[in-house]
Amino acid sequence: MNRQIAKYIQENTTEIISKWKEQMKEDENERSFQMTPPEIMDKTSREFADLMASNLLESHQAYENRLYDFSEKVVRLGWSITFVTKAITHFSEIVFDGMEQEGIITQNNTRDYMKEFSNWITPIRDKTIDAYSKTWERTVSLQKIALQELSASLIPVFDKVSVMPLVGTIDTERARLIMENLLEGVVKHRAEVVLLDITGVPVVDTMVAHHIIQAADAVRLVGAKCMLVGIRPEIAQTIVTLGINLNDFTTSSTLQRGVEQALAWTNRKIVEVDE
Amino acid sequence: MSNQSSVEIQTEWDIVAARQLGRNVAKELGFGTVDQARITTAISELARNIYLYAGHGKIEIQRLTNNGMKGIMIIAADNGPGISDVRKVMEDGFSTSGGLGAGLPGVKRLMDEFKIDTTQGEGTDIRATKWLR
């Protein structure tokens, strides 16, 4: 019975694909179809059809490898998972209808074929979803690592002066990282002044402010001064309206002025030389 | 006349999503950068309260039009433990979680209208509105 289905697919590939494409286009205005160039679309569709047939013939292992490669490719093309599962359903429906018309599926064996079809389609769908979620998981975990690397690094800019640029949203996890790196860095670089640059922090609410205040307090405890720089005008206004007290802080609007102030604290300044 | 969209708050990252939604709506309505910052900060506070105290809830953003005035309303609703003493949480510096205690009174100052409905053991519903001037 498997072979019958496979044989039918192989003999009528072109027809099935064109019908399938028609139906997918009709079904939804899926962007994947309009955005993918037609020749790639053709190739991928053919590959998809091959894959669907190969499941019926090849050994389990070979098929799994192929399925994995294919789903990787589909993910790269940017087909959505809804689109792919729909594609699988449509494909099997078209094959079923086609075989019915050809008289291969008759009233007597409909039940058996239906069972066979579901045995054929279900694992494909499961595997595809599995492959998708694996790709996603990998992406997410890679991005998490990348984000952590970006998170909070203390950069020594001058002797005794270090800068920590903060970019992006600060959540509890990052606040912890900021605190750890800040204290470790201060001790390691023997910094006397640390500039916390919040130019890249989109929202400063009470929690973010609280974390910054705590970090500054901790820095004070290890014997350095903390300065808050990069406060944008709208952030300044919201901080005031929220009623957050930053009186214990030296603050400045730009990193540049912060650095000047930090040098002044350590009895230095930048001068122009005339030659 | 209103038009709304919402974000479920379950994890810390949902706070960011709610904020983003609010900022986009505020921008579309024509709020300036300072008001955008006020609105997103208010959403951030309310969403964080849901995350910290109720664990699960919803932030709804409504566009309002009233006699030709345009505005934005943030609705923060949860089925959490409720607030036992509303007057106290509206005082500056009161916090049960070791925070700054500026959240709710801060939101009230950031926005134009502020209304809080809470029943102990049943949940809290906070509505804060900002009008476009």
Image: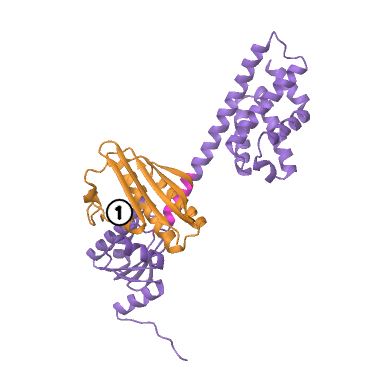
Chain colours: A purple, B orange
- Which residue sits at x=50%, y=59%? B30
A157 sits left or right of B116 in the view: right
Q: Which residue is mark 1?
A: B103
In the image, residue A195 above or below residue B98: below
Residue A74 in percent (x, y) is at 62, 39
Residue kind at label 1, given as amino acid type: Gly
Horizontal placement of A198 versus B2: left or right? Answer: left
Q: Quadrant of the N terminus of chain A?
A: top right
Identify which residue is drawn at 38% across, 64% down.
A235
- On the image, the x and y values in percent for residue A245 come to 27, 64
Residue A170, above or below A94: below
Residue for point 73% across, 33% down: A22
| Residue nearer the viewer, B69 or B101 | B69
Q: Name the quadrant containing residue A201.
A: bottom left
User: Which element is circle 1 on?
Assistant: helix
Give the image location of residue A186, x and y in percent. 30, 65
Residue in view at x 70 percent, y 30 percent: A50
Report crowding for label 1: few under 14, some 14 to 19, many 20 or more residues within 10 A (C-alpha): many
Q: Which residues are magenta?
A: A140-152
